């Protein structure tokens, strides 16, 4: 997949997540969070007001730390296609 095509598909997947209104499982949200942060090369510490949420987010980032940004985009897209798009129809 070319970078431009991948980036467009990634943005469409992000939009699908942002417009999804049903509750999503926490483990899925954490994976999406980690892949999104890595894809955008934003590895700053989580900034939730809740320490426990920060810990879960930090753990998700640690688990995905070896993933490269382009791979993170692909993984994010794949998760959205598998877990969110079929349910939004």
Image: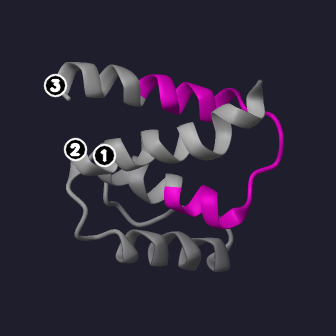
For mark 1, does the 10 Å Cα neighbourhood hold few (<14), some (14 to 19), or many (20 or more) residues?
many
**61, 74: nearer the viewer:** 74
Give the residue drawn at x 51%, y 32%. 14
Q: Is residue 42 shown left or right of residue 4?
A: right
Measured in 3D between alpha carbons, the distance from the residue under mark 2 to the one under mark 1, in whole angstroms, is 6 Å
Q: Is residue 3 shown left or right of residue 21?
A: left
Q: Is residue 14 above or below residue 78?
A: above
Give the residue number, with chain letter if any, for mark 3: 2
Give the residue number, with chain letter if any, for mark 1: 39
Q: Is residue 73 above or below residue 29?
A: above
Q: Earlier along the polypeptide chain: callout 3 or callout 1?
A: 3
**47, 39: nearer the viewer:** 39
Residue 83: give x, y in percent of width and height: 64, 46
Way the structure is coloured: one colour
For mark 3, does the 10 Å Cα neighbourhood hold few (<14), some (14 to 19), or many (20 or more) residues?
few
Kindly state the secondary structure of the residue where label 3 is placed.
Answer: loop
Number of on-image labels: 3
Give the residue number, with chain letter if any, for mark 2: 70
Measured in 3D between alpha carbons, the distance from the residue under mark 2 to the one under mark 3, in whole angstroms, is 10 Å
Kindly state the secondary structure of the residue where label 1 is placed.
Answer: helix
Give the residue drawn at x 40%, y 53%. 35
For mark 2, does the 10 Å Cα neighbourhood hold few (<14), some (14 to 19), or many (20 or more) residues?
some
Residue 53: give x, y in percent of width and height: 64, 72
Q: Nearer the viewer, mark 3 or mark 1?
A: 3
* Mark 2 and mark 1 residues within 8 Å of each other at the beta carbon: yes
Give the residue drawn at x 62%, y 59%. 28
Stretch of the chain drawn in magenta: 11-31
Measured in 3D between alpha carbons, the distance from the residue under mark 3 to the one under mark 1, in whole angstroms, is 15 Å
């Amino acid at each position: 997949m070319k970078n431009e095509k991948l980036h467009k598909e990634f943005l469409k997947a992000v939009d699908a997540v942002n417009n999804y209104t049903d509750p999503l499982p926490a483990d899925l949200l954490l994976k999406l969070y980690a892949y999104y942060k890595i894809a955008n090369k934003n590895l700053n510490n989580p900034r939730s007001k809740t320490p426990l949420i920060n810990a879960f987010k930090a753990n998700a980032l640690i688990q995905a730390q070896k993933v490269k940004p382009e791979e993170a985009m692909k993984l994010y897209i794949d998760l959205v296609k598998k877990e969110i798009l079929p349910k939004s129809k």
